[in-house]
Structures are given as structure tokens and as C-alpha cells.
Amino acid sequence: MRKIIWLLVISFSITSCTEIIQLDLRNNKSEVVVEASMATANEIRVLLSRSVNLDESNTFPLLTGAQVSISDENNNTEVLTEIEPGVYQSITTKGIEGKRYFLDLIVNNQSISATSTMPSIVPFTDMVVEKGSVFGPIGGNTNTDNTEYYEIKVLFNDPVEEVNYYRFVEFINNEKQQEYIYDDRLNNGKDVEIVLFRFDRLLKTEDVVRIEMQTITKEFYVYLSSLNDLRNSARSGSTPANPVTNMQGTSLGYFNTYTSQSKEYIIE
């Protein structure tokens, strides 16, 4: 198959994608924030908090004592356990490819729900890490500590029979650096090589590079895209808003089911 190289132009800053950018206007009504994720072969984990106004401290109160349950299309249901304040997790229910899941919550007599279908795994074929070249110092670094600039490429074969959405998360020495999202509109069914484009990737000998490849739902892709758009609009002074959500009963948060695979490379 013809190989296509893509430079990913949609990327995020060095913050977790599970962060909710609180952009509600001052004196708006406080809302429940739901951050729910479940990967293949892993339990669902739900973080519940409450939004705050812009004139309040940037600390989101955690919500305890909620009723949280997860069920599937076969009517199997599990009530999640609150393992720490505001954090709820399943014990027996784990993500399975292609299965549809239903999340239901009751928080202070407020009903909230969402549905998500676990995508199919797209095999992570290979990861290539190699020295690159850029002009001038990178991020103010004059390269006096034996660091060098590296490029990272990820390779996979996109299935032809379905629309796919991807998220790649970059870790250096187990610390999250950046994430990238991508869809297959321009290369459906083709052999794909993506350059995870980043100018300030300075690495040294024995650094460990890990890339997690996630196949995500369209709903979560839209959430991440809108979150990125809101970050950009906030910088330009546009009217605040909230990311697009797949939740019913609250306008903040998401329910994300995804597949997960990782590859590592040690700099020599």
C-alpha cells in the first residue's frame, strides 16, 4: 500500500487531557464535572467534582457519596466503589472491544448519564525514534548538557471498513509531555506513518521514550478538538465556552472508552 506521511497539526500543551478547562462565566451556576475513562481490559474510573466561578479559587470540590453504576448491552450492571474521595472505580467490569457501555450517576439527587461504545483495536505497528535537525537553539536550550533533538514517528495500518479516531500520548521517563489527536479522513485503509511533531523534544542517553496509541470514539475526539479550540480562543480573548460533551444532565465532562497500546525506546 502507498505510504502517507502526516505532520500532526493538532496537539496539546503539557497538561493531561483529562483536565477540564473551566471557562464558565462568573456567577454562573456551579455544575457537576464528570471525567470517566475505561480502556480495554481495564476498569472504569470516574472522577466527580464541581465547577467553580472565575472569581473563586482554582480548586474544584470533589463530590463524595454519589451513586455511580456501569452497565453493558447485555444488561450486566455493577455499582462502582468510591476508592478515594470523589474517585469511583469498577471491580469486575472491564473494557471489551466493540461493547456498548452505559454510565449512570446520581449526584445530590441530580441524574447524569452517558453512553460509549468501545472501539476496535488498530494494531500499533512500529515506533521510530531518530535524531532530527532544527535551526537555532530549541526553547532557549544551547545544548550544553549533551541533549539532542529527536523526531518520533508512529506507524499503523488504518482499517478500510470503518472511520477511526486516534490519540497518541508521549511520555519521557514516565512523565507525560504532549498528546496528539488524528482522524483517518484522508488516509482511510492505508499504511500510515505519522510524525509526532514537536520542536522542543530534547533527549539524552538513557532517556526512555514511550508512546501510547489509543483508538478513541468520535465523541471523545470531538471533545478533545473542542477543548483545543477553546484553549486557542481563550488566548485570543474570545468569549468563553465549554468543550463539547457526551454527558446528559451536565454540560461539563466526558465518558471515554478507548483501546490502549504502548511502545518504548531507550536513547542510546
Image: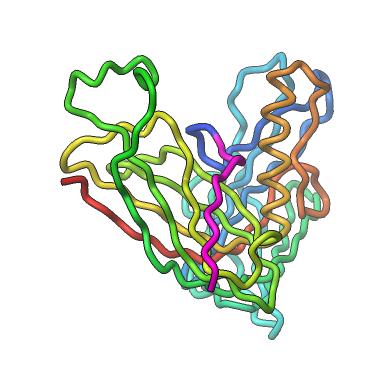
Residues in magenta? 1-12
The answer to which of 268 and 115 lies nearer the viewer is 268
- Decide whether residue 22 is among the magenta residues: no
Asked if residue 26 is positioned above or below residue 224 in the image, the reply reads above
In the rendered structure, the answer to whether residue 139 lies left or right of residue 85 reads left
Please give the count of numbered marks on the rendered protein: 0
List x then y, in percent, for residue 25: 81, 22
x then y, percent, for residue 212: 43, 56
Q: Residue at x 52, y 54 (%)?
A: 5
Horizontal and vertical percent for residue 1? 53, 74
Name the spot of residue 91 as percent of width and height, x first: 48, 69
Q: Nearer the viewer, residue 231 or 161?
A: 161
Residue 175 falls in which quadrant of the image? Answer: top left
Residue at 72 percent of width and 31 percent of height: 230
Q: Name the residue: 66% across, 45% down.
A: 224
Question: As rendered, which of 152 and 46 lies closer to the eye?
Answer: 152
Residue 72 vertical placement versus 128 (above, below): below
Q: Residue furthest front?
A: 2
Q: Is residue 140 above or below residue 221?
A: above
- In the picture provided, is 217 more to the left or to the right than 144? right
Residue occupying the point 71% across, 47% down: 223
- Is residue 7 within the magenta segment? yes
Q: How is the image coloured?
A: rainbow
Question: Residue 1 vs residue 135: left or right?
Answer: right
Farthest residue, direction bottom:
74
In depth, the one of 174 and 236 nearer the eye is 236
